[in-house]
Image (cartoon, helix red, strand yellow):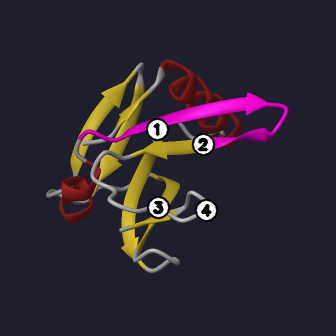
Amino acid sequence: MITLTETASSKVAELIAQEGQDDLMLRVAVRPGGCSGFSYEMFFDSEKDSEDVVNTEFGVPVVVDPSSAQLLTGATLDYKDGLQGAGFAIDNPNAQKTCGCGNSFS
């Protein structure tokens, strides 16, 4: 299961608050595609399946489907805000190869 850093959790909580819906969760998924074989997908979701893996990081509920959870075991989601720009980044020890954009892996 993916974990969130405190910085990422704070940013996600801020974004959820802006949406104005208390029941939103961060859904993280791995989908086929991208230039390296798989790509990451993140979005807010208010529904979960009975098979979904749910974890709470610093008060933020994170939902992952079972097949994605296998590929995200040990991964960390961080948020960086610097001179190079701001955004979320996933550090995934399961990725053997990543592309230059950082959004896909194999």
Between marks 2 and 4 in the image, the one whose residue lies nearer the viewer: 4
Q: Which mark is residue 88?
A: 2
Question: Would you name the residue on which mark 4 appears?
Answer: 100
CA distance for labels 3 and 4: 7 Å
Of 61 and 31, the residue lying toward us: 31
Amino acid at the residue labelled 1: Leu
The answer to whether the residues at label 3 and label 4 have Cβ atoms under 8 Å apart is no
CA distance for labels 2 and 1: 7 Å
Query: SS for tag 4?
Result: loop
Amino acid at the residue labelled 2: Phe
The answer to whether the residues at label 3 and label 1 have Cβ atoms under 8 Å apart is no
Q: Which mark is residue 77?
A: 1
- Residue name at image x 60 percent, y 33 percent: 79
Asked where in the image residue 30 lies, by quadrant, the reply is: bottom left
Q: Position of residue 55 (x, y in %)?
A: 27, 34
Question: Would you name the residue on which mark 3 appears?
Answer: 98
Of 50 and 64, the residue lying toward us: 64
The tag earlier along the polypeptide, 3 or 1, is: 1
In the displayed structure image, the side of residue 80 where residue 33 appears, left or right: left
Q: Position of residue 71 (x, y in %)?
A: 25, 57
The span picked out in magenta is: 74-88
